Amino acid sequence: MTNLTHLTITEARRRLAKGEITAVELTRAHTEAMAAKRGLNAFITETPDLALEQAALSDARRAKGEAGSLEGIPLGIKDLFCTEGVRTTAASRILDGFTPPYESTVTANLKRAGAVSLGKLNLDEFAMGSANITSHFGPVENPWKSKSDPAKKLVPGGSSGGSAAAVAARIAMGATGTDTGGSIRQPASFCGIVGIKPTYGRCSRWGIVAFASSLDQAGPMARTVEDCALLLGAMAGHDPLDSTSAPLPVPDFAAALTGDIRGLKVGIPKEYRPDGLSDEVARIWDLGIEWLKDAGATPVEISLPYTKYALPTYYIVAPAECSSNLARYDGVRYGLRVEGKTLDEMYKKTRAAGFGAEVRRRILIGTYVLSAGYYDAYYAKAQKVRRLIADDFNNAFKSVDVILTPTAPSAAFGIGDNTDDPVTMWLNDVFTIPTSLAGLPGLSLPAGLSADGLPLGLQLIGRPFDEETVFRVAGVMEKAAAFTAAPACVAPTQARRESAGEAGEGV
Amino acid sequence: MAYILQGDTGDWEVVIGLEVHAQVISNAKLFSGAATAFGAEPNSQVSFVDAGFPGMLPVINRICVEQAVRTGLGLKARINLTSVFARKNYFYADLPQGYQISQYELPIVGEGTLTIDLPDGSTKAIGIERLHLEQDAGKSLHDQHPTKSFIDLNRSGVALMEIVSKPDLRSPEEAGLYVAKLRSILRYLGTCDGNMQEGSMRCDANVSVRPKGASELRTRCEIKNVNSIRFLQQAIEYEARRHIEVYEAGGSINQETRLFDSAKGETRSMRSKEHAHDYRYFPDPDLLPLVLDPKMVETIKAGLPELPDEKKERFMGEYGLNATDAGVLVADQASAAFFESVAKGRDPKLAANWVMGDFFGALNATGRTIDDPPVTAAHLGELVDLIKDGTLSGRLAKEVFALMVETGKGPAALVEEKGLKQVTDTGAIETAIEAVMAANPDKVAEIRAGKDKLIGWFVGQVMKATQGKANPGMLNELLAKKLKG
Amino acid sequence: MSLDKATVRSIAELARIEVPEEALDHLAGELSNILTFVEQLAAVDTEGVQPMTSVTAMTLPLRADDVTAGGHADKVLANAPEAMEGFFTVPKVVE
Ligand SMILES: [Mg+2]
Ligand SMILES: [Zn+2]
């Protein structure tokens, strides 16, 4: 019998619909995988019993002919989404013991579509990080291993590292992620899966623990482009509870995967090829351009001149918003409280003990850049540069339909590497942050393996609310890439075959 | 009359600007669907948005926006078709989000004017700097427990209009008149109930002093949350005198927030606000710019009621009232309407006297309100008619009015029932005069000898004999004739 | 911009995060590095550029004035580290 955890969502839906498998069987296969792969530390809270209960209800609904679009599909939920009755931590000690009395709009939408939740996935604390090493619940391990040092534990990327690891390790068929500066796309790239940050406003932010409100956006992570399209279709939609939610209908994203991109103009931004870009990343990008040409699209060199200012802009805007968004964690109404003699002492002790070093650092920077006398030099300046960055894209999209770039400047690195200086760590997001600042949809898909056997992703960026074009192009590239590699831990035989040269070798 | 405080070194003038927080009348809060009613059980009118729970987001209430526009129009102020909500960041136990959503650089309402009516009948225009929408904080109770403060978030998120005046006020009296007038306008507009006891209207005063004739502005202190006009006036006076004392002793004033202690009649520095505030305002990324449809503003404008100033003008023109009387009558919309229904088709001056005199007196005495008056406008109108047609003398009318208050009956019925009709029959009055004269020949002689003072005594005796019903005019006339012989 | 200890202390005070005195130096160094990094922006000519607060082209949606929430003090208080008689409680505040 096939291992049910290897099915794509698309395939599982077909087999569930035919009655070949039940939601309970499918879910049990995944709860077993969850238990077996606990070593990855992908989950903060596992809810296998709840999942099996939901699966049984799902089977009952299907029997009554009431199947939703994701009926019986077991997913993992990033622990930044509030889930009614299930502990929600944001990977922070400061939410100690917090059980939300409400369900986030995105997870409620998934439930309504029939999806089953396996539990709450690990992440960087408050989604602040690019390696999933800032979690109060410990780092997540990437299921992929490098050829040169198979014993070395690698990061899954971040902040949605638990989501990426769980999907890559075949624990969950798909997962929710959130992306503020690359937190869906970069871990997707590091773990060899597909992830899309949709246009800002496509998914409701209601019930998602906020990091930087003008940037945060939820999106799906899965193993194929079509699976992501299906997931996003269920997650997205206008929500009157979020004032920034776009009042637009949700297209049938999967239907956009026509396979036909003839005549499409694909922008190739020259600023994404800086001096010192690794040859491997440059080569896989060139390969992607070739695939698109072969499919009848036209690559067009474009310029996004303000690209190099995106990172400093982001590291003013995001900490500023975070310093304010995280002020509510004060030990009064929920979460951790460390007693003090006075109210202020209680605040200071609680927040010092509750937040980890990276979160504290960002709160302090954010507090500083908003403070009297510095606002104009930092925050107001960053907001202006942000407009210039967004205008870069507006101008580019006058002549191209979609933009292709690498997702990240490198493949996954070791847990403990790049931690000396926060700014070095931030460079991971250099290719994803501009898109976030402009609020555009960005998708990462696995394009091949590095010489060391680690996945490398390419990013497609679309016009606002034109996820359909992004998916269409991604579908074509996915086919061309034929990325069937999997981490050794999930399919030893398959992985052996692949390492013998079937997929992605030598790029 | 200029308000001048005398110091040892000379005369000082006080400069006052007021920030009034007026609770918007709405069913639900500014950014959440929780109710706004006063006096509910603690934390029972709290949504997860108001309690600052993770992932909760604000969505603005249309009615609160309309109420702010209505108020802005009532203050003859500029309505900003685009305004922006900003976060004011600070930590406090009753501020669940760690910031207050307010408006900073672009408020919904810009500059306007409020005219105060001075007691001498003149007016003074006070500039309005701005009006912005913001959310209220919760409430801290400090006296429930020896070592704890209790927090109730029912108020958290309730919509407030912060109405900021220019520093145009020059005396505690003007400050009081400003607050009273603002309250009157808000009530006319139906945008705030103006109840200072329940905290739906709160006042912060920025006070500074300067030598009389100087034009610079000196350091001001902000006195927070004064909850009555009387306290406001006391607080301003105390604070102004404190500044003068400090200056005259060679000291300087620190800009700070102070609290008025109504028991001691003093202001004191607020310890909880001691460290310098740095609110780190920035546009709230959860909320997009508020853009008003000009048609919506026009519709609200067209639906505005006649406001106190216009009504006062009209009362002066249409009813011939003086500025002071008109000012008193229009202060409250219901009183003005009451007056108008009494005055309709009658002598307006007489109607005004009765409304402001005996009627307001009866309201006070009975503790009833204009909406549930002890005497209806229709009945008071009938009474005015009975005075006008000579059925009742002024004195009798007062007697009848007292009975109206007591019984709730109409004046005609009471006059009939109690036989209080004025005697206007010449013969009956003459008979009574003659009887009194016959009984007091000595006094008649004295009058005839020139002791005019005794005429009053005779009037009294005749009135007594007629149980006060003799028409006073006729009585005087006939008496004079008879006494002359 | 290089931050001194006193500035870091006052930022930490504003943010209500306790920082031990002996950690101030190191933190000042880290924060200064970050500021130096973001100060690249000073090189960008932003004359006449409108600050961008939100990427969406929308304006603020308005909701109806209906009471749709509240009435569940129990749920509001359920996660509280400390509560009494229906109130959240904190160390006594002296005004
Ligand atoms: Mg103020
Ligand atoms: Zn205010």
Image (cartoon, coloured by chain):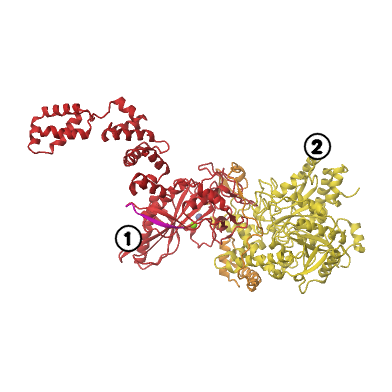
Chain colours: A yellow, B red, C orange
- The residue lying toward the viewer, choosing from A313 and A83, is A313
Residue, disc 1: B5
Placement of the C terminus of chain B among the 4 image quadrants: top left
Q: Amino acid at mark 1?
A: Leu
Image quadrant assignment for residue B174 = bottom left
Subunit of mark 2?
A
Q: Confirm or reject: label 1 Cβ below 8 Å from ligand 1.
A: no
Judged left or right of residue A44, residue C44 is: left
Residue A439 position (above or below residue A28) = below
Label 2 packing within 10 angstroms: few (<14), some (14-19), many (20+): few
**Picture coordinates of residue A17, whole percent (x, y):** 85, 43
Residue at the (68%, 63%) spot, across then down: A437
Q: Which sits in the foreground, A124 or B357?
A: B357
Disc on res. A64: 2
Marks 2,1: beta carbons within 8 A: no
Magenta-colored segment: predominant secondary structure = strand
Q: Secondary structure at mark 2?
A: loop
- Figure check: C75 above or below A448: above
Whether residue A228 is visible here, answered yes or no, is: yes
Output the chain of dot 1. B
Indicate yes or no whether the magenta region holds residue A374: no
Q: Amino acid at mark 2?
A: Lys
Q: Is residue B265 visible?
A: no
